[in-house]
Image (spheres, grey):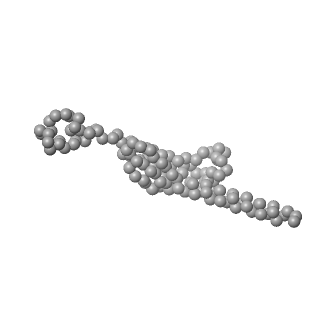
Amino acid sequence: MAKSIKPDKNSAGGSGNSSSAKEECPILKWIHVTMTRKPRNEQPAWWPKDTSLPYKYEFFKMKVPNGTVTHWLSSGGGVDFYRIPPGSCTFTSINFYKEIEDWVAEEKAKWKKEEDEKKAKKPK
């Protein structure tokens, strides 16, 4: 698809080189994202414990070449983006990473407690 460009005021009624009269528009793209969980036995220990498939209504942020969208996934764990110009995109599931950070914090607290108990049991 091409968009029209107004002819230069100095040209005679727009006649002349046809390439100056039209400019190509970038081809717009679309993306579909679906977040699903692996079966529990294939997940690392730090993986969030929720076992429902897929990630229903997960809060996310998507950076696309023409802006940023913050929204929720559908009940099927997916979202579509249309009319995206060429370029790179970044999808971030905000709550998913928070769950992992919470797990890491809990594990660190357990480790510290165990270390403190070992130190308290050592003879002085």
Q: Quadrant of the C terminus?
A: bottom right
**Image coordinates for residue 10, horizontal then vertical, percent:** 14, 42
Residue at the image position 45 percent from the left and 46 percent from the top = 89
| Left or right of 44 in this view: 122 | right
**Looking at the image, how many numbered discs can be counted on the residues?**
0
| Left or right of 93 in this view: 107 | right
Residue at the image position 56 percent from the left and 54 percent from the top = 96
| Left or right of 21 in this view: 112 | right
Q: Residue furthest right?
A: 123
Q: Quadrant of the N terminus?
A: top left
**Image coordinates for residue 82, horizontal then vertical, percent:** 38, 46
User: Where is 97 relative to 123, above or below?
Assistant: above
Is residue 19 or residue 45 the one in the foreground? 19
Q: Residue furthest top?
A: 17
Residue at the image position 21 percent from the left and 38 percent from the top = 21
**Image coordinates for residue 78, horizontal then vertical, percent:** 48, 48
Q: Residue furthest left?
A: 12
User: Where is 88 relative to 72, above or below?
Assistant: above
Residue at the image position 53 percent from the left and 47 percent from the top = 35
**Image coordinates for residue 32, horizontal then vertical, percent:** 45, 44
Residue 39, picture quadrant: top right
Residue 117 visible (yes or no) = yes
| Left or right of 16 in this view: 3 | right
Residue 57 visible (yes or no) = no
